[in-house]
Image: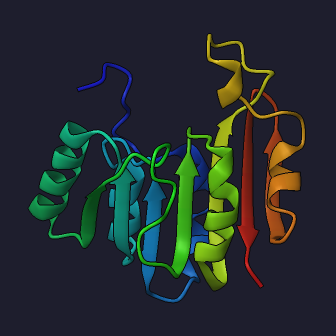
Amino acid sequence: MRAHAPKDPSAWLVEHRELLAVQPAGRALDVACGRGRNALELARMGFRVDAVDCDRDALAEVAGRAAAEGLAVQAIERDLEREPNLPQPPYRVIVNINFLQRTLVGPLVAALAPGGLLLFETFTRACTRPMRPGYLLEPNELLRAFADLTVLRYREGPVAGLVARRD
């Protein structure tokens, strides 16, 4: 297990539970799900979740935890950097936490069902952690990238977070 891999759902997801709770039941996508902390939380909220990652061991853990809790999570092994297509849209909710692949912006928007929510959060250039510059957002980049969606919540600092709806 990665030493830094948290088990609790992202604070950004938890902070927006009320928006997720009013979404109609349906499918959700957790992009670069890691060990599944957000996928499992979405499933606990009643969504059928596709959890995508390139790490086979992490996906095995996601699948095992979902099975143990009787949750509807499908673990999908895919290297989105090499194969940037998303599984079987449309989705009521898409969560993208701590992962930045700019070529996925268009596919993420297209994969959202009408009225669906995108929760996106990742690091910006203001972050002091040592990270490759290509994985850091420029100022206001999320707002520009998802300009076709209706932004419901936004914040920016060392980490930028966006919650947006497809109308």
Q: Where does residue 72 sit, x and y in percent of width and height?
A: 25, 73
Q: Total of numbered circles in the picture? A: 0
Q: How is the image coloured?
A: rainbow
Q: Where does residue 43 sit, x and y in percent of width and height?
A: 34, 69
**In the visual, does 1 lie left or right of 16?**
left
At 60% across and 71% down in the image, what residue appears? 18
Q: Could you tell me which quadrant the N terminus lies in?
A: top left
Q: Where does residue 156 sit, x and y in percent of width and height?
A: 82, 39
At 36% across and 66% down in the image, what residue appears? 50
At 62% across and 10% down in the image, what residue appears? 130
Please tell me in which quadrant of the rendered image residue 124 appears.
Answer: top right
**In the visual, does 141 lie left or right of 89?**
right
Q: Residue furthest front?
A: 82
Please tell me in which quadrant of the rendered image residue 14 appears.
Answer: bottom right
At 69% across and 26% down in the image, what residue appears? 134
The residue nearer to you, when weighing 160 against 54, is: 54
> In the rendered view, would you say 52 is above or below 155?
below
> In the rendered view, would you say 6 is above or below 104?
above
Q: Where does residue 70 sit, x and y in percent of width and height?
A: 15, 70
> In the rendered view, would you say 1 is above or below 149?
above
Q: Could you tell me which quadrant the C terminus lies in?
A: bottom right
**In the visual, does 84 lie left or right of 109?**
left
